[in-house]
Image: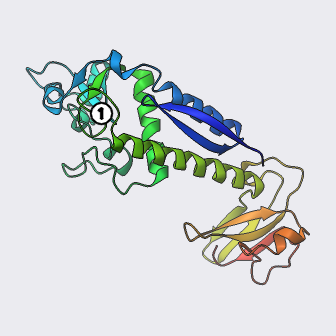
Amino acid sequence: MARCLIAVAAASAAVLLAVCDLDAVIAHLLALSAIFSSSPDALPLLNQQDLSRYDGEVGSQGLYLSVLGQVFDVSKGRRHYGPGGAYHFFAGRDASRAFVTGDFTEGGLMDDLSGLSPSQVVALYDWLSFYQRDYRPVGRLIGRYYSDTGKPTEALRQVEAALARGLELKAEAEADSKRFPSCNSEWSAAGGRVWCSEKSGGVQRPWAGVPRKMFNAGSRSIRCVCVPGGNPELSASAALQEYEGCPPLAESCTVHSF
């Protein structure tokens, strides 16, 4: 598949991504590039003490939260982010990590993304896109992601690199899902069945294919995929394996597990 280069402006630094030429991924990249369309210099700088004064409590100065050092006024979502709201723990701080880990303890409500996977970083940027779209940006937070002059830090550049890798992996996964659509499946106490059709895996195509186990070395996972029957190149692939006891060209196989 042809590959293309897409420049994404991220926090005023251009991240050059090599991704598969997939319409959905390109649209995703373009949406993310809009997140950083405004210059950081156009917004005021806040430190953590400043931000803590905007937690929505009685006597506070407002209701703000920060994602990756970008501060948003979430006053219009007070019922969610204000005192008593389900997400009040996000108010007055940058708890970027918790958006993708779901750890809402004090220990988990932090801006440090160390150890997160590239896919998790992509999910975090989806959250950032949401706030950029639905809430008013009001500043940049001095600390992990922005210096005291408002410039992106090395930590932010590392996050951008993880984003680039995550988007590349996402593009590759989407390409694989079209090349190797998932099987249909049904299960009962006695066992299961996997089969292929011209719409299995949500991919419309002119062929049904035959079920194969596909091994993902990176995640050590196995999934059932449909491949064109009689393709010698695919049959020789080390990543693909026939289901035991199932005829090689059968469109349906009885199985005990994936």
Identify the image quadrant of residue 200: bottom right
Residue 28 percent location from the top left of the image: 58, 35
Q: What residue type is labelled 1?
A: Tyr
Task: Determine if residue 73 is in view.
Answer: no
30 horizontally vs 92: left or right: right
Q: Residue at x 43, y 19 (%)?
A: 38
Pick the residue in front: 181 or 1. 1
As drawn, 237 above or below 172: below
Q: Residue at x 32, y 41 (%)?
A: 96
Identify the image quadrant of residue 189: bottom right
Pick the residue in front: 41 or 220. 41
Q: Which residue is drawn at 36% across and 57% down?
A: 115
Residue 231 percent location from the top left of the image: 89, 67
Total marks drawn? 1
Task: Determine if residue 70 is in view.
Answer: yes
Identify the image quadrant of residue 218: bottom right
As drawn, 16 above or below 118: above
243 horizontally vs 159: left or right: right
Q: In which quarter of the image is the C terminus?
A: bottom right
Residue 246 percent location from the top left of the image: 81, 79
Q: Give the residue at the far left of this rendering.
A: 59
Instruction: Categorize mark 1 by other alpha carbons within 10 Å: few (<14), some (14-19), many (20+).
Output: many
As drawn, 114 above or below 20: below
Pick the residue in front: 181 or 3. 3
Q: Is mark 1 on a helix, strand or loop?
A: loop
Residue 101 percent location from the top left of the image: 35, 51
Provide the residue designation for mark 1.
Answer: 146
Q: Which residue is drawn at 33% across and 38% down?
A: 153
